[in-house]
Amino acid sequence: MSVAVEPMVNLPTELRPPLAHDEVLLEADRCLACGGPYALAPCTVACPADVDISGFVEALARDDVVSAAETIYDQNLLAGSCSRVCPVEVLCEGACVLTEEPIQIAALQRYATDWALQHDVPLRPAAAPTGHSVAVVGAGPAGLACAGELAARGHSVTVFEERQEIGGLIRFAIAPYRIEAEPLPAEQRALEALGVRFRFGSEVAGLDELASYDAVFLGVGLGEDVAMELPGDELVGVWESLPFIEALKTGSPPAVGERVVVIGGGNTAIDVARESVRLGATNVTIVYRRTREDMPAYSFEVDEAEEEGVAFAFRTLPVRFLGAGRVNAVECVSMRPGSPDESGRRRPVPVPGSEFSLRVDTVVRAIGQQPRPELADRFGGFEHDWGKVVVDDDGRTSNRRVFAGGDAVNGGDSVVEAVRHGKRAAAAIDRSLT
Ligand SMILES: Cc1cc2nc3c(=O)[nH]c(=O)nc-3n(C[C@H](O)[C@H](O)[C@H](O)COP(=O)(O)OP(=O)(O)OC[C@H]3O[C@@H](n4cnc5c(N)ncnc54)[C@H](O)[C@@H]3O)c2cc1C
């Protein structure tokens, strides 16, 4: 088990704060504008949305923010949200040739898109109506990107969303130190100006409801947190990660107390732990059943969490929650590597007699989201692989009228991957209709 590190003082409430105008000019001017007629710049190659990064950075260096925004929107209609949440350290900024101090591409993109949203710069020029109609189910990033791209090509697009707001997990699950509600309302207005219609509070139960549309795109994401049923999980203070973060993002932050245990090894566990530190917890521990090297979380974020004072208990498995009414301890058992599973990875097994307890005020289980296999029957009987919708290279399901993208297809990835899927399906739907 690692030992708690002295936390940093004055933790930033926003991980990636905006740049001022003069900082933008200086930063953009550092770009070497690499890439040319024979090869794209490495940052653009690394961008799943294919944004011409050196092109928009060069426009910013000339102080032409409108041209910068137009270059970005040409490929990514959700670029404002992406500038806040993209894991740029492993994408564009990670590919920057200035390896010592990469260009702050995300901050520059945020500057251009925030300016454009504030000044009503259109996402794309208006297109002549085609007379075709498309239904998009889900206003997460996959659905929004698909809807925007189709509207920009002149199709009539209606987005059905069971919630009352756009954004999907961007709005309700991505930690507030990365993104608050903004810029989603402004992105909604920009998409509406492009012609996209939203029907909020509309849960689509099945394909029958969408019979009048020429094509359907499913961007419905994944389900609730994976269940981890342990004795004592009904105790007050035991949370699942999605309701925990949603409470933070909708203005009702949980009173976490001093001692927080977060169960899991992914990026969500890291976010919950770092937000708990910001809520005032002084002893935050991530409990993970394998080793640090096995954690699915980005290693740079594991390091950042540690710098902020988060402790780690590796090779540790919680077995029950203890307390009377409210949780006050988590009983755990130590793990050791067992025999290899089908993938060759050694399965952790409990060490007999190694039980110990961690005192807690709050526990958050952050071990992933469930797939939604029930969707296949409701939406045209398409093929799926353990709940992940199977699509071809165009994002088309085995039902030719139905396309899909985002987490429902890849099992959970990133916002910009969802945008890529939305774009891919929109291009294919457009080809099939015209
Ligand atoms: C805790 C957490 C933190 C994350 N942090 C990051 C991060 O920092 N950066 C990053 O890039 N990615 C992050 N991700 C991943 C990212 O949020 C997802 O990959 C992305 O949101 C997937 O987009 P989507 O459109 O496929 O699905 P979602 O965002 O899940 O959107 C699906 C939408 O469909 C709606 N819907 C579902 N069923 C229906 C129906 N039947 N009728 C009508 N509407 C319906 C839902 O209400 C929802 O609005 C995180 C994910 C989680 C869980």
Image: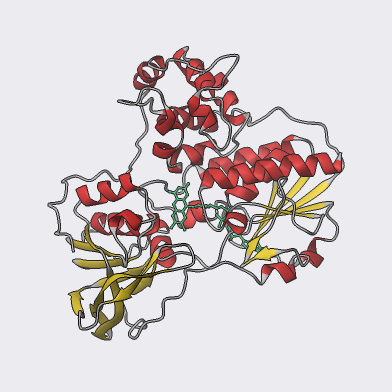
Quadrant where the image shows the C terminus: top right
At which x and y percent is residue 250? 42, 59
Picture residue at 43% right of the left edge, 53% below the top: 174
Residue 289: x, y in percent?
Answer: 32, 68
Whether residue 59 is visible: yes
Residue 256 in view, yes or no: no
Task: Report the side of 2 relative to 366 (left or right).
Answer: left
* Residue 50, placed above or below residue 224: above
The figure's colour scheme reads: secondary structure
From the image, which quarter does the N terminus lie in?
A: bottom left
Q: Residue 306 at what x, y percent from top left?
A: 22, 51
Q: Is residue 184 above or below residue 336?
A: above
- Answer with left or right where residue 286 lies relative to residue 98: left
Q: Residue at x 18, y 66 (%)?
A: 258
| Residue at (47, 14) in percent of width and height | 63
Residue, x 68% and y 58% (percent of image)? Answer: 390
**Above or below: residue 62 compared with residue 424:** above
Nearest the viewer among 150 and 358 is 358
Horizontal placement of 261 versus 208: left or right? left
Residue 194 falls in image quadrant:
top right
Q: Is residue 205 above or below residue 389?
A: below
Q: Quadrant for ligand 1?
A: bottom right
Image spot of residue 168 (x, y percent): 55, 55
Q: How many marks?
A: 0
**With 137 as the anchor, is 115 left or right in this view?**
left
